[in-house]
């Protein structure tokens, strides 16, 4: 998320794996909206394989898993966010909203006072 010159990126670690970050949260939102991993991936401009690998990593990091796949035909196929997935996503979005308040803190104002609007050109060698 970008607030003026401040980029905020919350990442939740699970050992050496990235359990949840902004891209995975967006993927969960897209799965909830589209009802499948492949459609969610397409909506976010990623391959099915990439979306599936991200879902697999999230599922290995959370107990119980955050996404379940539904096999079969008709309306009962695709994927859905589990109750755990909904709680995890809500908590993450709440943390993002709380983190956004950093832009209102005095420390950020002090940092911003010395920040250029654009970087200087690279030094000649």
Image (tube, grey):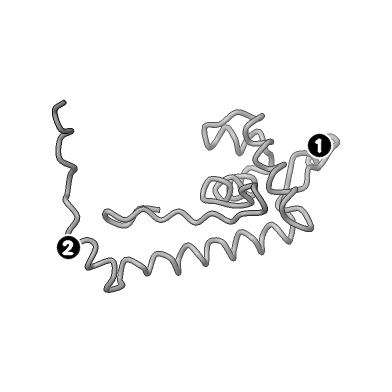
Residue 50: image location, x then y, percent: 62, 32
Q: Nearest the camera: 64 or 106?
A: 106
Residue 119: image location, x then y, percent: 19, 42
Residue 8: image location, x then y, percent: 41, 56
- Of the two numbered discs 1 and 2 in the rendering, the one whose residue sits closer to the viewer: 2
Judging by the rendered image, the residue that carries numbered circle 2 is 113
Q: Is residue 24 above or below residue 96?
A: above
Q: What's the residue at 28%, 66% (across, down)? A: 108
Q: What's the residue at 67%, 52% (across, down)? A: 15
- Marks 1 and 2 sit apart, C-alpha to C-alpha, by 58 Å
Q: Quadrant of the C terminus?
A: top left
- The secondary structure type at the circle numbered 1 is helix
Q: Are marks 1 and 2 in contact (CB under 8 Å)?
A: no
Q: Quadrant of residue 27?
A: top right
Q: Nearest the camera: 57 or 1?
A: 57
Of the image marks 1 and 2, the number of the one nearer the N terminus:
1
Q: What's the residue at 66%, 64% (across, down)? A: 87
Residue 13: image location, x then y, percent: 61, 54
Give the farthest residue toward the right.
72
Task: Judge left or right: residue 39 versus residue 23.
Answer: right
How many neighbours does mark 2 have within 10 angstroms: few (below 14), some (14-19), or many (20 or more)?
few
How many neighbours does mark 1 have within 10 angstroms: few (below 14), some (14-19), or many (20 or more)?
few
- The secondary structure type at the circle numbered 2 is helix
Task: Judge left or right: residue 79 versus residue 11.
Answer: right
Q: Nearest the camera: 115 or 79?
A: 115
Q: Nearest the camera: 116 or 98?
A: 116
| Res 108 label | none
Judging by the rendered image, the residue that carries numbered circle 1 is 74
């Amino acid at each position: 998320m970008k607030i003026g010159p401040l980029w905020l990126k919350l990442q939740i670690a699970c050992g050496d794996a990235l359990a949840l970050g902004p891209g995975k949260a967006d993927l969960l939102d897209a799965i909830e909206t589209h009802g499948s991993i492949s459609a969610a991936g397409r909506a976010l401009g990623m391959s099915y394989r990439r979306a599936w690998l991200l879902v697999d990593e999230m599922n290995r990091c959370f107990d119980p898993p955050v996404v379940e796949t539904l096999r079969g035909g008709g309306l009962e196929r695709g994927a859905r966010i589990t109750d755990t997935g909904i709680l995890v996503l809500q908590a993450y979005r709440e943390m993002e909203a709380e983190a956004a308040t950093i832009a209102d803190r005095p420390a950020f104002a002090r940092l911003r006072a010395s920040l250029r609007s654009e970087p200087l050109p690279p030094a000649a060698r």
